[in-house]
Structure formats: structure tokens, C-alpha cells
Image (tube, rainbow, N blue to C red):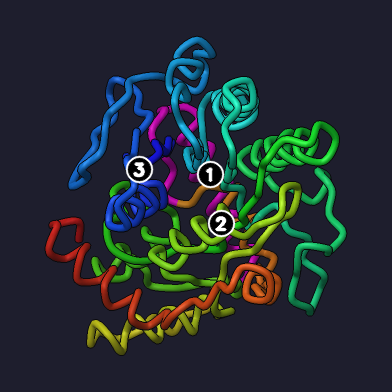
Amino acid sequence: MPLTLVTGASGFLGWHVAKLLTQQGHRVRALCRPTSQLRELDVERFTGDLRDADSLTRAVEGCERVYHVAADYRLWSKNPNDLYEANVEGTRNLLDAAIRAGVERIVYTSTVGCIGMPPGEQGDENSPVSIEDMTGHYKRSKWLAEQVALEKAQADGAPIVIVNPTAPIGDHDWKPTPTGKIIVDFLANRLPAFVDTGLNLVDARDVAQGHILAADQGKPGERYILGCEDLTLEQILQRLAKIANKPAPKLKLPYMVAYAAGVISTGIANITGKEPMAPLEGVRMARKKMFVTHAKATRELGFQPGSVDTALERAIQWFQESGRC
């Protein structure tokens, strides 16, 4: 069986991609930094760093496919340049190494945040969008990284397919991700109120399957949204309440109150260096409902996501059993 490189296997989505590949019989090499933990995976560990081009040259050697899932996913950083070094220059380094090595197919994991969001409508892969629409350093860095991937695929003919996952949920959300933190905070009674925002939720296992479908059937230079169901934050909390048999918060915060909390929380974090409870970047992102359609992925890849409620149930069980709430 040919060798496949997965970046980000120590994180949430990368773990699910690596796990599914091994379950399907693939030989997987996982690129990890020296301090990263690889848990519950039967893979070859390769120590390297996206910022170290030489290590990436060695990492892709002998690989037929590369899944670049790793990203610095933070809505606050005391040193924002770290996000650009990892997400933009790191992506450029890895894609260059994979292209030089003659890798047959590269799947780059972008984000739904790079999709245009027309007011009052679902966004899709063709919705107009520019860097001016990107709120905060994380989204800007991912948008710039996506442009690197698009340019190499469309201008240079590199075999790169791009996937744009929405908000994944499920088990093995180690950190957790910002979406997973909503679930953890709800279970720990740390969400007394909510803002009027919306997300498209999708099972992380389905996103992993979407990556493999993109490698098998995706067209180089094309983007594919991997999502499932549009839900307001209020609806998400109501579903969590039903599954966990807990009351859902009923207080809806006005945006300006949430914004003020974000300013104060982030200001304190910039002084202390500790992550803010309410990152201003996250509050600003919440002003827009991130509703999208995955019709193109269904039509061209055969992507068929399953129940969001099942993924929420699995997430709750995993967070509780792993002692994270």
C-alpha cells in the first residue's frame, strides 16, 4: 500500500483523517513537532515542522498522497505573526516539497471562513470574497494560505484539491477547538447567555471521509465545502440541552455587550499572556452567520454527511469520559 503523509494528526481533524486512512488499510506517516502527542493512532511518526523546509522534504519522500490538515487555529495570539508563519509560509513550504517530490495528489484543508457569506443567503464556493472580508489574523492567514494553494494548482498545474470544512464536532477534540469549547462550556455551566450568531455543523468523521473523497475524485484547483447543517447558536444550545438533559441558556446578549466583553477580555489577555475568555476576534466573527451549502461536494464527490445530533452525542460522551468537563 502506498505511503500517505498527514499533517495535523495530533489535532482534531487531522486525527480523524489519519484514523480513517489507517482503518481503510493505508500506510500513514504523521508529521509532528517534537512536542506534539500522537494518541490512539497506528501510524509512522515523523518529527518535523512546517517552518522547517528541509524537514518537509524528508517528510514527503516516498509519499503518494499528502493531506495537509495542520493549522495554527487560534482566535487570539499574543504574537499574531506566529499564525502567518505556520499557516501561510508553512503551507507554502509543504506544497513546494510535495510538488518537488512528485506527489500524485495533495488535499489542502482550508476553512469555511474563506467562503463568501452573502447577507441572508447560504455561501458557496463561488460566492464573492476577498481578504477584506476576513475577520482577524486566523481567517486572514488561512485565506492567504488558500491563495497559495489555488495559485499553485491553477497557475502551475499542481495536483492540489482544497476542502473547506465548516464547524466540525465529535470525539477526540483534544484541545478543544472553539466549536468543541462551546460544548465543554455548556456542559460545565459556563454559558449563561449567548449571542445571535450561526454556524454550519458537521461530524468530524464525515469531514475525514470528505478529505478522502476529495483525493479520489476532486478536481485540482477546485474548492469543496464539507458541511452539513446550518444552526443558530441558540438552536445548537437547545440540542445540547436535550441530549445532555440540562437547561439551555435563555439570555440573548446584545452584540455591543458581547463586543465590550471581548475588548476587555482581550485587553487583559494582551497584558497577562493568558488566553481570553471571550476573544474579540471570535466576537467579531460571530456577527455574521456562517451558513453555507455543501451541494457541490455532494454533486462532485458523493459527499453525504450524517446526523449532526449523533456527532453532538458522541462529542458529549467523549468530553465527559475524558474528564474535560
Q: Which mark is residue 64?
A: none
Q: Nearer the viewer, mark 3 or mark 2?
A: 3
Q: Amino acid at mark 2?
A: Asp
Q: Quarter of the image containing the N terminus?
A: top left
| For residue 259, side relative to residue 187 (left or right) | right
- Is the residue under label 1 in contact with that under label 2 (CB below 8 Å)? no
| Image quadrant in which you'd find residue 302 | bottom right
On screen, residue 31 above or below 111: above
On screen, residue 201 above or below 261: below
On screen, residue 9 above or below 92: below
Q: CA distance from mark 3 to mark 2?
A: 15 Å
- The residue lying toward the viewer, choosing from 304 and 70, is 304
| Image quadrant in which you'd find residue 105 | top right
Furthest residue to the front? Answer: 1
Mark 3 neighbour class, 10 Å CA radius: few under 14, some 14 to 19, many 20 or more: few
Mark 1 neighbour class, 10 Å CA radius: few under 14, some 14 to 19, many 20 or more: many
- The residue lying toward the viewer, choosing from 220 and 317, is 220
Confirm whether the magenta stretch covers residue 262: yes
Callout 2: SS: helix
Q: Residue 292, how many percent across, how many down?
A: 68, 72
Callout 1: SS: loop
- The residue lying toward the viewer, choosing from 117 and 102, is 102
What residue is disc 1 on? 75
Q: Residue 229, how many percent across, how many down?
A: 55, 79
Q: Amino acid at mark 3?
A: Met
- The span picked out in magenta is 254-277
Q: Earlier in the sequence, mark 3 or mark 2?
A: 3
What residue is disc 2 on? 216
Query: What secondary structure is the magenta-colored segment mainly?
Result: helix
